[in-house]
Image (cartoon, rainbow, N blue to C red):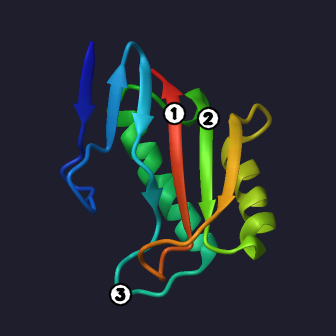
Amino acid sequence: MTHAVNLKDLPKGGPYSHAVVNNGIVYLSGQTGNIPGKQLTFREQFINAMEKISKILEASGSSLDKVLKVSVFLSKPEFFQEMNDLFGKHFGTNPPVRTTIVTNFTSPEVLVELDVTATQ
């Protein structure tokens, strides 16, 4: 059975669901940690994105310890080491698989986006 998960208190940037659950797998839309009109550090954006991801996973019947895969999109390669450190702190000793890509975003204030797949 497939169903969408949307959190009323979490704004979206378009017509998509925060997550879709299908056969016990939770697919999250990519989450950024920026706050429009406010300049945040990479660390602040990463932590904000992880907080959003945690909320969406919880609403989907999952959690960070059930994450299978994370795709990390960075605006600059210089953020890689800081991302690696923060990733390790959030996912501990049994981390999920990960892909890291450096890319441009449609908004120059976005420094990182995280795309997550988890089990319920």
* CA distance separating discs 1 and 3: 29 Å
Identify residue for label 1.
117
Along the horizontal axis of the image, is 74 left or right of 120? right
Identify residue for label 3.
37
Along the horizontal axis of the image, is 82 left or right of 3? right
What is the quadrant of residue 77 in the picture? bottom right
Q: Residues within 10 Å of mark 2 (few under 14, many from 20)?
A: some
Identify residue for label 2.
69
Q: Earlier in the sequence, mark 3 or mark 2?
A: 3
* CA distance separating discs 3 and 2: 31 Å
Q: Of the residues tagged 3 and 2, which is closer to the observer?
A: 2
Q: Is residue 1 above or below residue 51?
A: above
Quick one: SS at disc 2?
Answer: strand
What amino acid is at disc 3? Answer: Gly
Mark drawn on residue 98: none
Residue 10 at x, y = what percent? Answer: 27, 56
What amino acid is at disc 2? Answer: Lys
Residue 2 at x, y = what percent? Answer: 27, 19
